[in-house]
Image: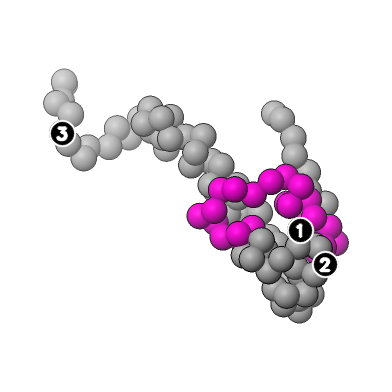
């Protein structure tokens, strides 16, 4: 049975990743998700240690404003060096790998 595609119709045979790739936004979406996960992990570690943003920024040897950019999931301009300093400040290691 051949069905017409309707506007708003979801092709249930394709994965969400395939849908994003087809629309050309897979990499952008994945980058944003990874950034949000890392920011959340840093926030959780800060909470566990009872660290304020001011204390965390001091440990990172950076400004509170820079820390706010790091923790903002909508701000894509965070470097690996900043992520590494943040991880180190809460006693964690940043690991980046290619698959």
Up-down: is 30 above or below 60?
above
Above-or-below relation of 83 to 6: below
Taking the spot 38% from the left edge, 27% from the top edge, the residue there is 22
Q: Is residue 43 visible?
A: no
In the rendered image, the vertical position of residue 12 relative to residue 91, given as above or below: above
Percent position of residue 86, x then y: 76, 58
Residue drawn at (21%, 40%) of the image: 8
Circle 1 residue: 86
Of mark 3 and mark 2, the one earlier in the sequence is 3
**Element at label 2:** helix
Q: Quadrant of the C terminus?
A: top right
Residue 15 placement, left or right of 73: left
Closer-to-camera residue (67/37): 67
Cα distance in 3D space between marks 2 and 1: 8 Å
Q: Compare marks 2 and 1 and give the one earlier in the sequence.
A: 2
| Local secondary structure at mark 3 | loop
Judge the density around disc 3: few (<14), some (14-19), many (≥20) Cα neighbours within 10 Å: few
Task: Residue under label 3, please give it.
Answer: 6
Residue at mark 3 to residue at mark 2: CA–CA distance:
55 Å
Give, as a single range, the part of the protein colored magenta.
69-91
Where is residue 68 drawn, in percent x and y? 62, 65
Say which residue label 2 marks. 59
Q: Is residue 78 magenta?
A: yes
Q: How is the image coloured?
A: one colour
Rendered image quadrant of residue 11: top left
- Taking 60 as reference, is 80 above or below it? above
SS under mark 1: helix
Q: Residues within 10 Å of mark 1 (few under 14, many from 20)?
A: many
- Residue 57 sits inside the magenta stretch: no
């Amino acid at each position: 049975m051949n069905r017409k595609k309707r506007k708003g119709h979801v092709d249930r045979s394709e994965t969400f990743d395939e849908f994003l790739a087809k629309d050309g936004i897979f990499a952008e979406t994945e980058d944003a998700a990874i950034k949000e996960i890392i920011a959340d992990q840093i926030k959780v570690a800060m909470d566990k240690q009872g660290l304020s943003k001011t204390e965390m920024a001091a440990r990172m040897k950076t400004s509170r404003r820079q820390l706010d950019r790091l923790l903002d999931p909508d701000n894509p301009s965070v470097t690996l060096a900043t992520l590494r300093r943040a991880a180190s400040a809460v006693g964690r290691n940043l690991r980046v790998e290619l698959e």
